[in-house]
Amino acid sequence: MISSFVKRPSGKEKGVFLALDLGGTNFRVMSVELSGDRTFKVKSTSRYTIPKDLTVGDGKELFNFIAASVDDFLTNNKLPLDKKYGLGFTFSFPVKQTAVASGELIIWTKGFAATGVEGCDVVKLLKDALHRRNISCISVEALANDTVGTLMAKSYQMPNCASGVILGTGTNACYPEEKELGGIIINTEWGNFDKFSQNKFDMELDERSNNSGRQLFEKAVSGMYLGEIFRLVVLHEMNIE
């Protein structure tokens, strides 16, 4: 139950912004134009595949790769470098946020294990990587979980949108806490819910994972793990150890 420090948008926000979405084996960079009347246009988008060795290697090199991809996006889409672009950083891992644009990674999930990132401010790591790449036209204005980003994006069009849910590589949900916090969006991190009965296949998968004992609900229902659960069931039914 983590505060995102943001509320749903008013729909009057206007301008061209960049978005960086990191949450699985691929990440996306895009530019979006908000019209100020609850409509928007995705002007350009690019998808980049993260090399497997970077997901479990040196965290600095992982963020260097992200910065290099942002540089590639700016170049390929011929975005003027003499302008300033506000960037929203969607970071789809459990983060203890301390401000709208600051938060420390609690623990990696979804197979990531890059060193030197857990316990660190991921916005600072991104800013440092952009600085090393001499990218000065970008200002990281907000940090958000992908679930929060989903709720924010839909709320721009539909102000009564009440929750955001992710069912993909991982799973999570968020909602605006109207009564207690005046509409601040709460990231529930429900992928870490563990008050349910695991079967033998769930337990075997968890034991073999690199974050054993964590994200148990996510491991039972999300895309990254269902294939392996199916494989374990088939081997069991065929009496193959």
Image (cartoon, helix red, strand yellow):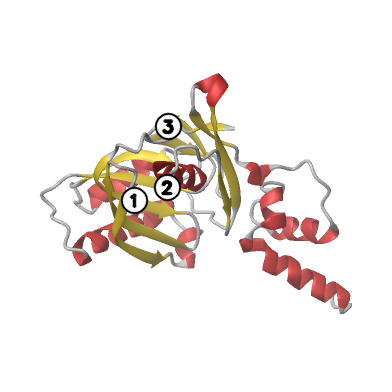
Q: Which residue is mark 2?
A: 90
Residue type, mark 2 in image: Thr
Which quadrant of the figure contains the C terminus?
bottom right
**Which of 43 and 205 lies nearest the eye of the viewer?**
43
Q: Residue furthest top?
A: 180
Nearer the observer: mark 2 or 3; the answer is 3
SS of the residue under disc 3? loop
Q: Residues within 10 Å of mark 2 (few under 14, many from 20)?
A: many
SS of the residue under disc 2? strand
Residue 146 point in image, percent of width and height? 48, 48
Label 2 or label 3, whichever comes before in sequence order: 3
81 lies left or right of 91: left
Q: Residue at x 62, y 62 (%)?
A: 223
Q: Residues within 10 Å of mark 1 (few under 14, many from 20)?
A: many
Label 1 or label 3, whichever comes before in sequence order: 3
- The CA span between labels 1 and 2 is 7 Å
**Which of 187 and 98 lies nearest the eye of the viewer?**
187
Q: Are marks 1 and 2 in contact (CB under 8 Å)?
A: yes
Q: Residue at x 39, y 42 (%)?
A: 156
Q: Which residue is mark 3?
A: 6
119 lies left or right of 140: right
- The CA span between labels 1 and 3 is 16 Å
- The CA span between labels 2 and 3 is 13 Å
Residue type, mark 1 in image: Ala
Determine which quarter of the picture holds residue 46: bottom left
Determine which quarter of the picture holds residue 230: bottom right
131 lies left or right of 2: left
Residue 188 point in image, percent of width and height? 60, 37
Residue type, mark 3 in image: Val
**Would you place residue 77 above or below residue 4 in this image?**
below
Q: Which residue is mark 1?
A: 19
| Residue 119 visible in the current orientation | no
